[in-house]
Amino acid sequence: MAKRTVATVPHRPRYLGLNELRPTVHLAGCYHFKRDVWFHYRIPSHHLILIESGRIEANTKDGRFEAKSGDLICFRPTEWNQYGTHTPTLFYQAHVEFARPPRHKLTPFLAGIGPLPVCLPMGEVFDDMRRAFESLCLEITHTGVIHQLRMRAAIYEMLAIIAEAIGPESQPVRHIDPWLRIQQR
C-alpha cells in the first residue's frame, strides 16, 4: 500500500517582531474639521490617528467603535475602512508601513504587550505622542537621509509611547543626576 503525503502550508506570521521593523512614512498631517465628514477608503498601510479634540466613529472589518479626545487609533491595512468625524474635530494622522514588501501589511507585535491596539486612550502620555506626530509632520516635507532618520525615530518613539501607555512594566524615564553625569565622565 502506497503512503500518501500531505502537503502542508507553511505557517505565515501575522505580526512583525521588533527586530523586523523598518518603518516608512507615506503621509503625515494635522487636520481640523468644522463639519461632520465620513471617509470610505482602502488602507494600503497602517493608518494612525491621534485625536486632540472631538470624536471619531469607525466602522472596520473588525467592528464598530468610537474614539474621543486623547485616543490613538491604529487602523490596520485593509481593502475597506470607514470613519467619520463628529465636529469640531482636530487630529493628527500618519500612514506608516512598518516593513518592506511583502511583509508591509503586518502589524508590529510588542513583546509582553501584544499587537498594536486598534484604539488606545493615551492618558498621561498624550503630549509625548503629539510631539512624535508633530515631528513627523515637520520632517515629511523634506527629503534626505537626515529627515528619513528623524521620521523613523519618531515612529519608534510612537511605539515606545504605546508600550508605555499599555505596558505592565511602565516606568518613568530616569533622568541623569548632574553629579552622576560628572562621575560617569
Image (cartoon, rainbow, N blue to C red):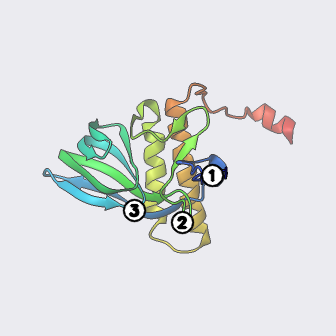
Of residues 126 and 56, the one drawn nearer to the viewer in this rendering = 56
For the residue marked with disc 2, what is the amino acid?
Pro
Q: Could you give the CA–CA distance between mark 2 and mark 1, rounded to whole angstroms? A: 36 Å
What residue lies at 25% left-to-right and 44% top-to-bottom? 58
In this view, 182 is above or below 156: above
Furthest-left residue in this view:
35
Secondary structure at badge 1 equals: loop
What residue lies at 60% left-to-right and 51% top-to-bottom? 6
Q: Nearer the viewer, mark 2 or mark 1?
A: 1
Furthest-bottom residue in this view:
143
Instruction: Please state the horizontal and vertical placement of residue 144, each as a whole percent of the image.
Output: 57, 74
Of residues 103 and 164, the one drawn nearer to the viewer in this rendering = 103
For the residue marked with disc 3, what is the amino acid?
Pro
In this view, 60 is above or below 78: above
Q: Nearer the viewer, mark 1 or mark 3?
A: 1
Instruction: Please state the horizontal and vertical placement of residue 136, each as a whole percent of the image.
Output: 47, 58
What residue lies at 31% left-to-right and 61% top-to-bottom? 42
Q: Could you give the CA–CA distance between mark 1 and mark 3, rounded to whole angstroms? A: 41 Å
Of residues 44 and 2, the one drawn nearer to the viewer in this rendering = 2
Q: Which residue is mark 3?
A: 44
Q: Which comes sooner in the sequence, label 2 or label 3?
A: 3
Q: Which residue is mark 1?
A: 4
